[in-house]
Image (cartoon, grey):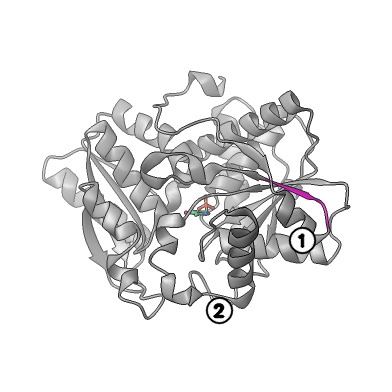
Amino acid sequence: MSIHDLPRIKLGHLPTPLEPLDRLSESLGGPRIWVKRDDATGLATGGNKTRKLEFLIADAIERGADTIVTVGAMQSNHARQTAAAAAKMGLRCELLLENRRAIPDPAYETGGNVVLDRLLGAEIIEQEKGTDLAVALERRGHDLACDGRNPYLVPLGGSDAVGALGYVDCAFELLEQAEASGLEIDHVVHATASAGTQAGLVAGIAVAGVTLPVTGVSAGMSASMLSELVFDIAVESGEMIGSTDAVDPAMVVIDDSQVGPGYGLPTDAMREAVGTTARLEALILDPVYTGKAMAGLFEMTRTGRFDSCDNIVFVHTGGVAGLLAYGSVFT
Ligand SMILES: *Cc1c(COP(=O)(O)O)cnc(C)c1O
């Protein structure tokens, strides 16, 4: 079974561009840094969940679902892209959003992604801080089924084997772009949180049979917990496209040095990375994921992890809508 045989709908502007960040590379004095613009996937301000939703929503439609339900933090970019995908396909959408009050700013509860969720017609069901979102999702699915509806439950971050197929496809896309332009990629760096993006990239690279190290910079979870999740999803996604033993646990590399006080909480290194990337490249990162991932890339560069002739691809997973709810973090 090839990835092209699996159900998929078109939601994103793909392929996304692969662009050099030469002013940033020069200022860091290390390898040449490139950006894979998955912040520009196009769906209601874009981001990495769009690729996953192309497979997830296709699966939902195939199963005759009438309601999409998912979970996340209040400023979940994933929830907003799910609301957008559901709107576009004419499906109802419910978002169970945990109000973590991550920052003392009213915009956290009403701005950024929440503005878009509402505009897109999704129903927000607020969850108390500390709610077990996986349990809440199952419960809501049960209640909807009892009311005669046919819900499709999308897990946190769209990170299951179906969703990760979006990043298997992204790995293929990236390898094709590199080949077409004669670019030899030495390393891929990206933000990782619910595991699906990294699982898909690792599975795609493994199935393609190439050697290309990937480092996921964690936005919250410890490396040991997250690497197990990534590996399990990668194996399952690989199996869905007929490859049973391509993924090796050694391919799953996670750097959890940038988490700071916790998921969604700002760090000085994140502020520096977001500010520098904006000023030198007019490339907007976000405080929760890509800012910490870029801070990780800065640190790796400064500590001599890469050769000065290397080509490093930073996968920009989006988050600009979330950034707009975190404005007070940057003043
Ligand atoms: C969800 C998200 C990530 C993390 O992707 P996972 O597949 O959950 O690991 C990274 N960046 C942004 C902007 C996100 O919204």
Q: What's the CA distance linking mark 2 and mark 1?
A: 28 Å
Q: Which residue position holds label 1?
A: 27
**Which residue is rendered at x = 78% and y = 39% of the image?**
185
Front tag of 2 and 1: 1
Q: Nearer the viewer, residue 16 or 75?
A: 16
Crowd class of label 2 (few under 14; some 14 to 19; many from 20; radius 10 Å) = few
In the image, residue 263 above or below residue 321:
below
For the residues bearing labels 2 and 1, Cβ distance under 8 angstroms = no
**Which residue is rendered at x = 51% and y = 36% of the image?**
166
Q: Nearer the viewer, residue 28 or 209?
A: 28
Q: Is residue 31 magenta?
A: yes
**Which residue is rendered at x = 36% and y = 73% of the image?**
100
Tell me where the magenta segment starts and ends, as one range.
30-34
Q: Position of residue 224 (x, y in %)?
A: 65, 63
Relative to residue 33, is residue 119 drawn left or right?
left
Tag 1 secondary structure: helix
Crowd class of label 1 (few under 14; some 14 to 19; many from 20; radius 10 Å) = few
Amino acid, disc 1: Ser
